[in-house]
Image (cartoon, coloured by chain):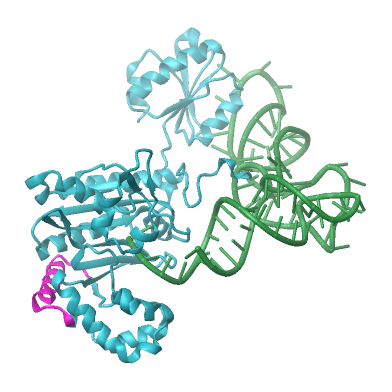
Chain colours: A cyan, B green
RNA sequence: GUGAUUGUAGCUCAGUUGGUUAGAGCGCCUGAUUGUGGUUCAGGAGGCCGCGGGUUCAAAUCCCGUCUUUCACCCCA
């Protein structure tokens, strides 16, 4: 730690024990649940053509313009490390023709964004996400949110909040932008510096500005949804209605803005109070991604694993709870016992019993200490006497009691141990 | 990219106005009669004081640079 010779790059970290056990729990439960909802796993390369992200996330978004690890490779190709999962997933599905237009896939993968690190923001971070393609249907959106909510439950996460809104259709965009600009115009010089710039570049960003002054003005003007077509508003209502049927509560937040270009209709965000300024553990929405002549419609979400972990820890869910422990520890006295225990260890492990032993000549005291540290439930001790008699001492570490047993007895080895 | 902030044993941290061999707690190792853990006691190992340069008789301590940590802006998961 002292020297940064051994440190990973800025904003990146090695994930190791004990935290890794929490990661494994998160991934395992996600895979199980996704399977219940009929999703198949998809693993796309972390490196893609730059154009894959430009065309789907949007050429002018911050993610593409200033956050990507983009570079030219030796062959002069423009490439980028994936900053999110949807673009690559849709690139893959588009290549599958008809099949890709009605698919359900999930991914658990590292993402890369070259930003200044901060609470809940790493340069390499990890997302678990899903994408379901198919004709726009509010029920698909509702099911997607339900799945996400289900997943949080499976992880043991409480205290999160779902906020939902709509971006309307592609044809709603111009009227919304015009409407908002017009409504904001009279207050132009009351807005913060950033918003004065944003009003032309990206009006929607004014809507979710954190500046108090801006927020007050935004509260006074009509919400973006007012400028949308009737059917767009109806779409959102249908989603909320379907969620209500499933007993899922969401908060409609007209000020919720999702930045990526591909979103249409329903957008949502899940936040958690344990997080810092970056308080969203997940985001999702319906999208339409144009690839060539085709536009692929779909709905999906992405959750930041690091942020989920921060939230879980606040809920009292810790890595320690998922750290493997228990099992058997073999204590060997003498070289011959060591060799015999290697054989026994193999047999136990074949039965799926967690089993460990010291491989070097250590004192019995040291071996017992280690057994205790490793959290072994039973210790099997063998030395010269036991080898000669074909027995072993089996000690229960919790009770402290021990007895000599006949090793030749298979029942003793695999059943009486109680594992 | 902007503005703050951090860096001393495996971990958490002390280290006075620059001044001999840089400390503590936890952890680790070894013992406390021959082959028995958790408690206790005794002993021990372990430090490019982030890195590079400068000031000084003397730098962990002051100055500059650099990397890194943490946090906020921005953006997003």
Quarter of the image with the N terminus of chain A in it:
top right
Observer able to see residue A89: yes
Would you say the magenta stretch is mainly helix, strand or loop?
helix
Where does residue A76 sit, x and y in percent of width and height? 35, 42
Q: Nearer the viewer, residue A31 or A5?
A: A5
Q: Residue at x 25, y 78 (%)?
A: A254
Question: Can residue A243 be found in the magenta stretch?
Answer: yes
Q: Residue at x 19, y 51 (%)?
A: A90
Magenta run includes residue A248: yes
Q: Name, please, the residue furthest toward the top.
A: A388
Query: Eyeballing the image, is A217 above or below A109?
Result: below
- Give how far across and how far down residue B72 sits, in percent: 48, 69
Residue A207 visible somewhere in the drawing: no
Q: Residue at x 49, y 35 (%)?
A: A374
Whether A144 is drawn above or below A393: the answer is: below
Q: What range of the chain is rendered magenta?
A: A227-249
């Amino acid at each position: 730690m002292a020297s940064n010779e051994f440190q990973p790059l800025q904003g990146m970290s090695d994930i190791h024990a004990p935290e890794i056990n929490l990661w494994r729990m998160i991934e395992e439960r996600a895979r199980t649940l996704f399977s219940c909802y009929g999703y198949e796993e998809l693993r796309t390369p972390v490196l893609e053509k730059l154009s894959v992200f430009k065309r789907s996330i949007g050429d002018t978004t911050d993610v593409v313009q200033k956050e990507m690890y983009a570079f030219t490779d030796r062959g002069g190709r423009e490439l980028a490390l994936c900053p999110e999962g949807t673009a690559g997933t849709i690139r893959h599905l588009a290549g599958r023709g008809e099949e890709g237009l009605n698919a359900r896939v999930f991914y658990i993968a590292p993402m890369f964004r070259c930003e200044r690190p901060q609470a809940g923001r790493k340069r390499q971070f990890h997302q678990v996400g899903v994408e379901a393609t198919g004709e726009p249907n509010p029920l698909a959106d509702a099911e997607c949110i339900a799945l996400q909510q289900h997943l949080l439950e499976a992880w043991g996460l409480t205290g999160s909040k779902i906020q939902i809104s709509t971006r309307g259709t592609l044809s709603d965009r111009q009227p919304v932008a015009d409407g908002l600009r017009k409504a904001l115009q009279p207050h132009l010089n009351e807005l913060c510096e950033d918003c004065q710039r944003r009003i032309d570049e990206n009006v929607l960003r004014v809507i979710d500005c954190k500046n108090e002054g801006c927020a007050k003005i935004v509260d006074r003007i009509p919400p973006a949804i007012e400028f949308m077509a009737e059917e767009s508003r109806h779409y959102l209502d249908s989603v909320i209605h379907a969620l209500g049927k499933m007993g899922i509560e969401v908060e409609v937040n007209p000020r919720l803005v999702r930045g990526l270009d591909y979103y249409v209709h329903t957008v949502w965000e899940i936040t958690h109070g344990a997080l810092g300024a970056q308080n969203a553990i997940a985001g999702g929405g319906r999208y339409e991604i144009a690839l060539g002549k085709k536009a692929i419609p779909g709905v999906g979400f992405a959750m930041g694993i690091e942020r989920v972990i921060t939230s879980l820890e606040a809920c009292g869910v810790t890595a320690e709870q998922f750290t493997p422990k228990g099992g058997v520890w073999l204590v060997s006295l003498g070289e011959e016992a060591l060799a015999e225990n290697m054989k026994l260890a193999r047999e136990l492990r074949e039965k799926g019993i967690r089993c460990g032993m010291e491989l070097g000549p250590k004192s019995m005291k040291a071996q017992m200490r280690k057994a205790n540290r490793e959290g072994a439930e039973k210790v099997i001790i063998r030395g010269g006497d036991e080898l000669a008699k074909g027995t072993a001492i089996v000690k229960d570490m919790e009770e402290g009691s021990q007895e000599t047993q006949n090793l030749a007895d298979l029942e003793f080895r695999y059943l009486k141990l109680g594992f």
